[in-house]
Amino acid sequence: MPMQLQDILYSQGFGTRRVCAGLIQQGLVQVYMDNCAVEPVECVQAATEFEATGLRFKVQGADWQYHEKAYVMLHKPSATECSHKPSTYPSVYTLLPAPLRVRPCKTHIQGVQAVGRLDQDTTGLLLLSDDGVFIHRMTSPRHHVPKVYEVTVRHPLDARQVQNLLAGVVLDDDPKPVRAAACEALDSHHLRLTLTEGKYHQVKRMVAAVGNRVEALHRSQIGGLCLPADLAPGQWRWLDSAQLHGITHPLHTYCAT
C-alpha cells in the first residue's frame, strides 16, 4: 500500500512527521526509483506517495532501506551494557544509528530493544528488534530457543564437570536443576555450552556450581544463526529473511561468512 514519503521516514525513526517533512522540503531526501537504480532522485514533496516495501532512499547522504519491522544483529563488544541507562559502561544502543534508537512503536517504548541481555563483560551475538511478538518468542523459556556460548574457564576442565553441566546443577535461587542442552570441552580451558533458557548470570553460575570459574564468555549462536565471521565487535547488520528463518528454525543452522 502506498505511503506518503514523510510517513515512510517517520516510520523509520527519522523524527516526527513535521521534522521528516522539513527534511524532504529542504532537499535532504533522495529516493531510488527502483532497486536497480544507481543514483537516487531528489524528492521535495513530503506528500509524494511511494510503495514502501523495499524502498531505498537517502537521508542527508545516508543510505537507508524501508523495513516494516526492525530485526538487527550486533556483535556486542566487552565493556558495554545492554541498557538504555547504563550504570558503568557505554550502552550498546550507542553503537546503533539514531533512527534505530527512536523508531516509533505502538507502546510507550521507542526504538529497537535487546532480545535478552548479555553481561557487560560478555561478547558476541546480540539481537535487537522493535517487534514485541518476536522478542517474546525469542526470550520466553517455553520456546526453548538454543543459545551457544564459548566459555573460557580458569581451572582445567575434567569429564565430571561436563557431565554435571549436562545432568543439571542447582543454582542458589532455584531448587530445580538447570541443565545444559549440550556441553563440550574444546580443550583444557575452553567449553562450548548450549542453553535453552536465560537466567541471571546463568553460564557463570552454572560453571561455578561445578567448581570452576568463567574467565571470558562469548555468545556465538542463537537458534540456527551464527555470528558472522566478518561482523567485527561493535558492528551491526540487518537480518535478512534467511537469517531470520535460521533463528527460528535451529535445525537449519545459518552461519554467514
Image (cartoon, rainbow, N blue to C red):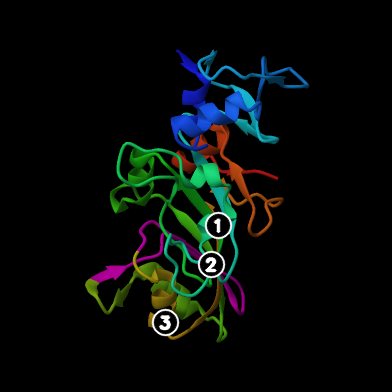
The residue pinned by badge 1 equals: 94
Q: Residue at x 55, y 57 (%)?
A: 94
On the rendered structure, is 164 left or right of 41? Answer: left
SS assignment at label 1:
helix
At label 1, which amino acid type do we have?
A: Thr
Alpha carbons under labels 2 and 1: distance apart: 7 Å
The residue pinned by badge 3 equals: 208
Q: Are marks 2 and 1 in contact (CB under 8 Å)?
A: yes
The residue pinned by badge 2 equals: 90
Q: Is residue 102 in sight in this rendering?
A: yes
**With respect to residue 146, does 62 lie above or below?**
above
Locate the N terminus and report the quarter of the image it occupies.
Answer: top left
Residue 115 lies, in percent from the top left, at 42, 51
Q: Earlier in the sequence, mark 3 or mark 1?
A: 1
Q: Quadrant of residue 77?
A: bottom right
At label 2, which amino acid type do we have?
A: Pro
- Number of the front mark, 3 or 2: 2
Q: In the rendered structure, which segment of residues is drawn in magenta?
A: 176-198
Residue 241 lies, in percent from the top left, at 54, 31
Alpha carbons under labels 3 and 2: distance apart: 28 Å
Q: Residue at x 31, y 53 (%)?
A: 141
Alpha carbons under labels 3 and 1: distance apart: 32 Å
